[in-house]
Amino acid sequence: MKLKYFIALFVLLPFVSFSQDSQGTLTKVGDAVPVFNFEIEKGKTVSISDYKGKLVLINLFATWCPPCNEELPEVQKRIWEKYKGNPKFAFFVFGREEGWDKLIPFKAKKGFTFPILPDADRGIFKLFATQSIPRNIIVDETGKIIYQSIGYTPEEFDGLVKFIDKHLKTSTK
């Protein structure tokens, strides 16, 4: 009987440790943010490098994703409402595999006022990861990734908010 459990554990262990370690993340804290262009509004393209000098929060999500739909109302209340007028802060939400046709009605229905932008071909997502949403990436004023998270929990989100608060307070002194 013990031998069966040992064999099962031995066979499954590589899969368990692989899924916990990788989670599909391609970037690390300390890396330069990958350079990419995106539509900031229909027909107007910008580059992420245009936002050097600002603290940039990038959120990767999908409209169908339950944890994403838990997180975004918190983002609206606890981050966007607080920092939308701060000239040293920028925030972009990218809809993985979704275009303007889905994102515009989604944003209106939910009452969000922050930028929700298309990533219809996963061109942006695949620079950061191969799987798992929501994801938050914070890029500092020099273009370096200084924070990354995967998934949504209230505790993790509290840490994200505190991280942004602390960084923006120290950078304005």
Image (cartoon, grey):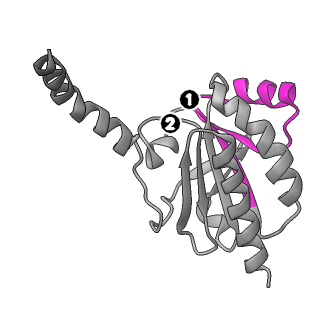
State left or right for residue 118 relative to residue 42. Answer: left
- Residue sitting at x 41%, y 40%: 23
Disc number for residue 46: none
Q: Are marks 2 and 1 in contact (CB under 8 Å)?
A: yes
Tag 1: residue type? Glu
Residue 1 in view here: yes
The image quadrant that residue 63 belongs to is top right
Q: Is residue 64 above or below residue 142?
A: above
Residue sitting at the far bottom:
173
> In which quadrant is the C terminus drawn?
bottom right
Residue 88 coordinates in the image, percent (x, y)? 77, 70
Task: Read off the residue under disc 1.
Answer: 97
Between residue 150 and residue 36, name the one nearer to us.
150
Residue 118 coordinates in the image, percent (x, y)? 64, 36
The residue segment tinted magenta is: 90-119
Tag 2: residue type? Arg
Q: Callout 1: few (<14), some (14-19), or many (20+) C-alpha neighbours within 10 Å?
A: some
- Disc tally is 2
- Residue sitting at x 71%, y 29%: 69
How far apart are the alpha carbons under marks 2 and 1? 6 Å
Q: Is residue 80 above or below residue 4?
A: below
At numbered mark 1, what does the secondary structure look like: helix, strand or loop? loop
Q: Is residue 84 above or below residue 117?
A: below
Q: Is residue 111 magenta?
A: yes
- Residue sitting at x 71%, y 37%: 71
- Residue sitting at x 46%, y 68%: 30
The image quadrant that residue 111 belongs to is top right
Q: Callout 2: few (<14), some (14-19), or many (20+) C-alpha neighbours within 10 Å?
A: some
Disc number for residue 122: 2
